Image (cartoon, rainbow, N blue to C red):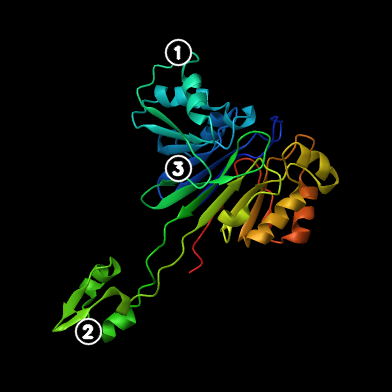
Amino acid sequence: MEVIFLGTGGTVPTPERNTVAVAVRVDNEVVLFDCCEGCQKQIMRSTVSFMKIKKVFITHFHGDHFLGLPGMLQTMGLLGRTAPLEIYGPEGAEGFIENLLETGYYGLDFDVRARDLKPGNTVQEAKFTVEAISLNHLVPTNGYLLREKTRPGRFYPEKAEELGVPKRFYGKLQRGECMKVGEREITPDMVMGPPRRGISVAYCTDTTPDWDTGAAKDCSLLIHDATGCDALKEKLNTFGHSTARQAAEIAKKCNAGKLALIHYSQRYREVSGLLEEARVIFQNTFAPRDLDTVMLKHED
């Protein structure tokens, strides 16, 4: 699973960074979280293909999180897209997207399907799910948890060999099928370990730190609002944001594998200070730059 940080800044783009958008590539499919102003230019500078984006999840309808949608939709149309595009968001998403499509002359040859997601609602795909998480911001806001579905257990060829299974039938057992060797039935559990948990990415911005973190428990990667330093905590929390230190405290509470800071305020040209504050609490923290890509691999 690849995580591509198309934009890492908050509220206002700067010469150093765009506002927020993150693409997650699962096999050959791309899920886009938020679609900032200038997102399509960032996509063109990355390894992401417009045609591979199947779903877009908007956290909320402040401009720095969705104003890139009109341009991206028109570009998809100009490139000849025919596959439908699904757009999800918090309460009011369907109305916002319908109004957006009425602005200007689109002439799209593909369907745009918008849907509200309440916290706890889940979108199912063949290999993963995306669950909406309730965040605490000034307007209705969702976080999202993308979770790879449970993978089959590890296959042990030495056990299959001991049972007399011909190698040409190994694949059958790995696919969960039973077979016979002589008069004995061989079942997959005889040659395979227990199911393995998939990779998960929690995308949580914009929010104060007092949101229900249960849904993000044990996530492989937590991407969390880190708008500023701890000295600005009171001000940032009042405006529905978190500090880098607070993001680290959430990561520790969630038992996250890694923490990525995001939504840096435009006041910071460099974010090394934010990274230092977070690492005091949660060592496995990094501060991505625009167009950084992180590869998440299975632990086993």
Q: Do we see residue 43 in this rendering? A: yes
- Per the rendering, the mark at residue 105 is 1
Is residue 231 depicted above or below 62 in this figure? below
Looking at the rendered structure, the kind of residue marked 2 is Gly
Is residue 119 depicted above or below 176 in this figure? above
Q: Are marks 1 and 3 in contact (CB under 8 Å)?
A: no
**Disc 3 target residue:** 30
> Between residues 57 and 110, which one lies in front from this camera angle?
57
- Per the rendering, the mark at residue 206 is none
Residue 34 lies, in percent from the top left, at: 56, 36
> Counting residues from the N terminus, which is met first, the one under dot 2 or under dot 1?
1
Q: Residue sitting at 72 percent across and 41 percent down?
A: 241
Is label 1 in a helix, a strand or a loop? loop
> Counting residues from the N terminus, which is met first, the one under dot 1 or under dot 3?
3
Q: Do we see residue 293 in this rendering? A: no
**Disc 2 target residue:** 164
Looking at the rendered structure, the kind of residue marked 3 is Val
Residue 143 lies, in percent from the top left, at: 58, 44
Are there few (<14), some (14-19), or many (20+) residues within 10 Å of tag 3?
many
Is residue 288 depicted above or below 149 in this figure? above
Q: CA distance from mark 2 to mark 3?
A: 42 Å
Are there few (<14), some (14-19), or many (20+) residues within 10 Å of tag 1?
few
Are there few (<14), some (14-19), or many (20+) residues within 10 Å of tag 2?
few
> Counting residues from the N terminus, which is met first, the one under dot 2 or under dot 3?
3
Farthest residue, direction right:
231
